[in-house]
Image: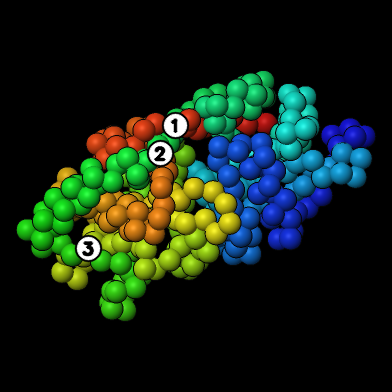
Amino acid sequence: MGDELALREAEPADARFFADVFTAAQPARPMDPPELRYLWEHPPRSRVMRRWIAMRHGADIGVGEIERPESTDAALRYTSLRGELLPAYRDRATLLAVMSVIEARACAERPSILRSAANEDDPLRADVLRAMGYREDRRARRWELDLVGARELIAAMTEESRSRMRVQGIRILTLDRDGDPEILRKLWRLSEDAVRDVPTTLPHVEEPFDDFLDWLAFPGMHRDRVWLARRGDDAVGISVLEYPVERGFVGTAWTATARSVRGQGVARALKCETLMQAMALGVDRVRTGNDGENAPILHINATMGYRPIAGRVDYLKDVSAAT
């Protein structure tokens, strides 16, 4: 990176700086330091992650990271990368330099595909990625719901959903109230089955059960706020809002339903309960995000009163010939 810029390996103690950089550069999407540190201290077993601090003349000015599946399967040889700079240093040349050296380190692990992303309201990053040879792949939609303005709509929708679930013999409850000793494994398997139906370009990497448990233990997750649907002994749905510890917006961490109940209003019923609970806790707005081609969940969001906000554009770069 020349004489002026250098990278050093990041440690868990750097998680706050990492979160501060992304928050300063993208204030519309704050990053929570305690949650990020938890992730660093409990890295997913199915993935390999490396992180760096970018320095200029000894001063920390930015960050970078790469992430790839742990699997050696040729179909999974892709690596995601991102880099960010404090606003005072965030110009095209510096961002390009940081992203380029991070890309070089990603390529050293011999992926076939590189993946990165830019938010729709971040033309600088999009320009840098295009200059590096990345092409647009997919778009993810993001939404925000004003819980104050939508209170009556959500309350009425919740009552209707509760009645519909009773008729169908589906119980809606929180995880802390479920006494089934196998419920966590059932929810894990439900989630793994559901994620395979989410539109994607790159293949899904199965999440080990222990990673699922680590996810449920995130600082922003609470078992009395994890909503699930039961039909008999089966777990047929889950929806949960994540509550940042220090900063950020309350947002949907995950919503999934079993194929056997899709089209029966289960996802809507679960999402309604999460929103009613958030309102009771004093939350005034929530956010969610979905792949731009996931029509069923996009329809649910629109009918529940969510309004679109700036989304994310995913970019890919084929480096198979170079590796």
Name the amino acid type tagged 3: Ile
Q: Residue at x 36, y 33 (%)?
A: 307
Q: How is the image coloured?
A: rainbow
Question: What is the crowding at mark 1: few (fewer than 14 residues within 10 Å), some, or many (at least 20)?
Answer: some
* Residue for badge 3: 172
Q: Residue at x 37, y 40 (%)?
A: 145
Where residue 237 appears, x then y in whole percent?
26, 57
Question: What is the crowding at mark 2: few (fewer than 14 residues within 10 Å), some, or many (at least 20)?
Answer: many
Give the distance between the C-alpha atoms of the residues marked 3 and 1, in whole angstroms.
30 Å
* Cβ–Cβ under 8 Å for marks 1 and 2: yes
Q: Earlier in the sequence, mark 2 or mark 3?
A: 2
Front residue (pair 280, 215):
280
* Cβ–Cβ under 8 Å for marks 3 and 1: no
* Residue for badge 2: 144
Q: Secondary structure at mark 2?
A: strand
Q: Residue at x 55, y 37 (%)?
A: 28
Front residue (pair 142, 114):
142
Front residue (pair 17, 313):
17
